Image (tube, grey):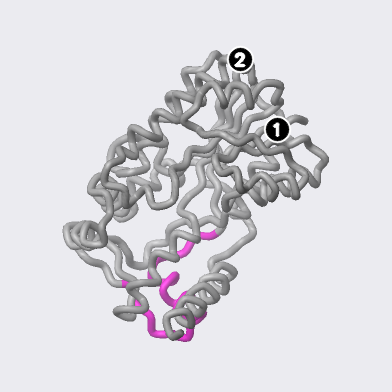
Amino acid sequence: MNIVITGSLGHISKPLVKDLVHKGHMVTVISSNPERKNEIESLGARAAIGTMEDASFLAESFKGADIVYAMEAMGAGSFFNKDIDIMAAITQIGHNYKQAIEQSGVKRVIHLSSIGAHTDEGNGLLAFHYYVENILKGLPEDVSIKFMRPVGFYYNMFAFIPTIKAQGMIIQNYGGDEKEPWVSPLDIAAVISEEMDKPFEGRPVRYIASDEVSPDEVAKIIGEAIGQPGLKWTIIPDEQMLNNMLAAGMNAAVAKGLVEMNAGRRNGILYEDYYRNRPGLSKVKVTDFAREFAAVYNNEASNVNH
């Protein structure tokens, strides 16, 4: 098949491209970075250099595709850009995808959405996934769309490193011993590749998760991996969490959205539809990720020491 992949060679797109090329598919990778061209081609794929903000470029890139894998992303550091409206920018990318899909005649789409996309209330920053899903649902009925809703990514835990180093604890505005789902990008890529080989019909939703562990268990597993077996997960009030993020220079709307998202974990709003449509768990567990976390943690420590 002729498959177009958005997301350049990110955490999900790179392993997905490798798998699809290995299966013998013709793969085109859209990237905004010209320096990625050689790496994309070295994987056996074709590079299309342009941006998600350019609907005409997307339409041209999608032409002739059997399947388009569409995801929204902002550039590195966008959470700290105080001049950007993240919600509006990503919603516009959704409109660009819709226009490009219509103009190119693509009939099969896999959209990377997220947990929390079932609502636009109480999920904070994740509300943009709800908006984009609904934009894409406005496509003609003969366009089949599979909405993939992964849960929280393991690599988001790298954000815990500064407070572990500075204060010897994980600090968030949620926590406790209630299990919650996490996912590896490798498992997301594997599920998407699997879905590409299955028939397309309608607008199904599939949640993707690798493991279900509580914040307290996460602290224990990570603590043991980094040689701090007593590591604790500490819960602070929403207002304090917000102030910490603002003090770090984060975009105010983004900080507010992240705090509200975490509150949604705490009160169950974020996971209500997940548990109604609970998936089987994939391969990569928190204990597997903990080794990767420890390598990053110790590498950063050695960099600080030198």
Q: Residue at x 61, y 28 (%)?
A: 109
Which amino acid type is marked by label 2? Asp
Quadrant hosting residue 56 = top right
Near mark 1 (Cα within 10 A), the count class, few <14, some 14-19 or many ≥20, is: many
Q: Which mark is residue 3?
A: 1
Which one is in front, 67 or 5? 5
**Residue range corresponding to the magenta coloring:** 211-233
Image x and y of residue 211, in percent: 54, 60
SS type, badge 1? strand
Which of pointers 2 and 1 lies earlier in the amino acid sequence? 1
> Dot 2 corresponds to which residue?
142
Classify 199 as above or below 240.
above
Classify 113 as above or below 250.
above
Which amino acid type is marked by label 1? Ile
Which one is in front, 163 or 214? 163
SS type, badge 2? loop
Q: Is residue 118 visible?
A: no
Left/right placement of residue 208 relative to residue 79 reads right
Image x and y of residue 96, in percent: 48, 25
Residue contact between numbered discs 2 and 1, judged by CB atoms under 8 Å: no
Which one is in front, 188 or 92? 92
Q: Is residue 66 visible?
A: yes
Classify 261 as above or below 196.
below
Near mark 2 (Cα within 10 A), the count class, few <14, some 14-19 or many ≥20, is: few
Q: Which mark is residue 261?
A: none
Left/right placement of residue 248 relative to residue 110 reads left
Q: Residue at x 17, y 58 (%)?
A: 239
Left/right placement of residue 72 relative to residue 57 reads left
Q: Residue at x 56, y 44 (%)?
A: 33
Q: Residue at x 50, y 22 (%)?
A: 98
Image x and y of residue 80, in percent: 32, 52
Residue 228 is covered by the magenta coloring = yes
